[in-house]
């Protein structure tokens, strides 16, 4: 997530949705929804970096905050396509405010939008 505004952005907790089900963290979503076909020895999820959603986070001007990081080994193009399709279906919702404490809510939208 990048802040391309004119000042720091204060982000309130994220909410994640996948196939209509809500998850409090992206780690929980991965645990439940990660495709069984990708859990075999062809693809290994080696690391998930979960952003702490317990409180507000500040993103500075022109700065980027990672939401998740997944390291994996794909042995086939089919596995890469399935992994891309899976992550492209994740939706996120969050609120942010400017330096004047004016909040804007961003409804559920796909992570790759």
Image: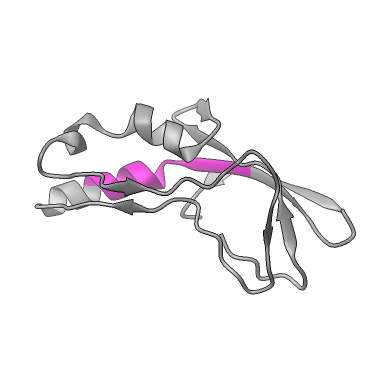
Position of the N terminus by quadrant: bottom right
Q: Position of residue 35 (x, y in %)?
A: 26, 33
Decide if residue 96 is in sight here.
yes
Q: Is residue 102 shown left or right of residue 46?
A: right
Q: Residue at x 82, y 50 (%)?
A: 103
**Residue 106 sits above or below residue 21 on the image:** below
Q: Residue at x 59, y 65 (%)?
A: 2
67 vs 52, nearest the viewer? 52
105 vs 3, nearest the viewer? 3
63 vs 78, nearest the viewer? 63
Q: Position of residue 9 (x, y in %)?
A: 73, 60
Q: Which residues are magenta?
A: 82-93
Decide if residue 107 is in sight here.
no
Q: Is residue 103 magenta?
A: no
Q: Position of residue 60 (x, y in %)?
A: 68, 68
79 vs 7, nearest the viewer? 7
**Residue 111 sits above or below residue 89 on the image:** below
Q: Position of residue 48 (x, y in %)?
A: 37, 46
């Amino acid at each position: 997530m990048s802040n391309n505004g004119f000042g720091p952005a204060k982000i309130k907790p994220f909410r994640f949705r996948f196939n209509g089900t809500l998850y409090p963290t992206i780690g929980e979503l991965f645990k439940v929804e990660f495709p069984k076909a990708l859990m075999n020895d062809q693809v290994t999820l080696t690391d998930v970096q979960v952003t702490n959603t317990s409180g507000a986070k500040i993103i500075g001007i022109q700065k980027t905050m990672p939401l998740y990081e997944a390291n994996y080994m794909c042995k086939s193009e089919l596995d890469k396509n399935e992994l891309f399709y899976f992550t492209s279906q994740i939706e996120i919702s969050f609120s942010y405010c400017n330096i004047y404490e004016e909040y804007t809510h961003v409804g559920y939208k796909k992570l790759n939008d």
